[in-house]
């Protein structure tokens, strides 16, 4: 619902990005309707399965203009979102099916301009210490990596 409320910008930060079909659809439609969508994820994920599964979904998003920032400045465990610079979401919810359906995750919605500005500044600091992906980078992956990603993508709903 929060993504659909976006009119200008959506910035999401998550350590584990294995999106469900519905989340992928929401992000793709947001980018296609002109919303600036930025996804901040860690450059290195501590779970090999999650790392491959996450990578497998990035091409779909890059093709429609979602900006993906691979954070290289250390451990990234922030789970946050800002919408239009006015609404903030943060909590323990990862952007994966397990968090949405199985775990007892919680997120807080904050409707406060000052708080959201501060959170957006933190997100910008993450972006500043990230490598932005592009389709050329994504297409240049090794064949073995592509096979591993596509195989683990099948397990996305379980991760």
Image: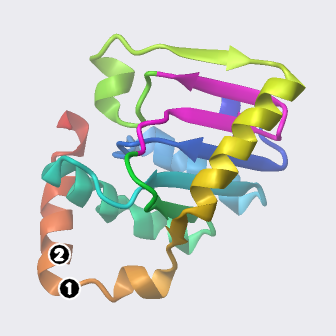
Which quadrant, please, contains the N terminus? top right
Percent of width and height locating residue 105: 40, 15
Instruction: Judge by depth and name the residue closer to the eye, 154 or 44.
Output: 44
**Furthest-right residue in view?**
113
Instruction: Judge by depth and name the residue closer to the eye, 44 or 33.
Output: 44
Q: Bounds of the magenta span?
A: 76-91
Per the image, the residue denoted by label 2 is 145
> Going 33% across and 89% down the picture, which residue do you hit?
140
Q: In the rendered view, would you say 124 is above or below 63?
A: above
Q: Is residue 25 left or right of residue 118?
A: left
Residue 1 in sight: no
Specify few, some or many for label 2: CA neighbours under 10 Å numbering under 14, 14-19, or 20 or more. few
Per the image, the residue denoted by label 1 is 142
Dot 2 lies on which element?
A: helix
Residue 73 in sight: yes
> Going 20% across and 65% down the picture, which residue do you hit?
149
Q: In the rendered view, would you say 61 is above or below 2?
A: below
CB-based contact (under 8 Å), mark 2 and mark 1:
yes
Dot 1 lies on which element?
A: loop
Q: Does the magenta segment cover residue 66? A: no
> Going 64% across and 26% down the picture, which residue do you hit?
89
């Amino acid at each position: 619902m929060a993504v659909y409320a976006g009119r200008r910008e959506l910035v999401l930060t998550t350590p584990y990005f294995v999106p469900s079909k519905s989340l992928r659809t929401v992000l793709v439609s947001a980018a296609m309707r002109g919303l600036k969508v930025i996804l901040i994820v860690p450059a290195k994920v501590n779970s090999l399965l999650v790392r491959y599964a996450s990578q497998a979904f990035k091409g779909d998003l890059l093709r429609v203009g979602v900006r993906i920032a691979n954070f290289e400045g250390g451990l990234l465990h922030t789970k946050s979102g800002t919408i239009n610079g006015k609404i903030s979401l943060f909590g323990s919810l990862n952007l994966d099916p397990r968090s949405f359906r199985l775990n007892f995750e919680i997120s807080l919605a904050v409707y406060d301009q000052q708080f959201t500005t501060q959170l957006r500044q933190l997100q910008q600091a993450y972006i500043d210490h990230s490598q932005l992906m592009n389709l050329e980078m994504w297409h240049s992956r090794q064949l073995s990596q592509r096979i591993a990603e596509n195989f683990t993508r099948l397990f996305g709903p379980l991760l």
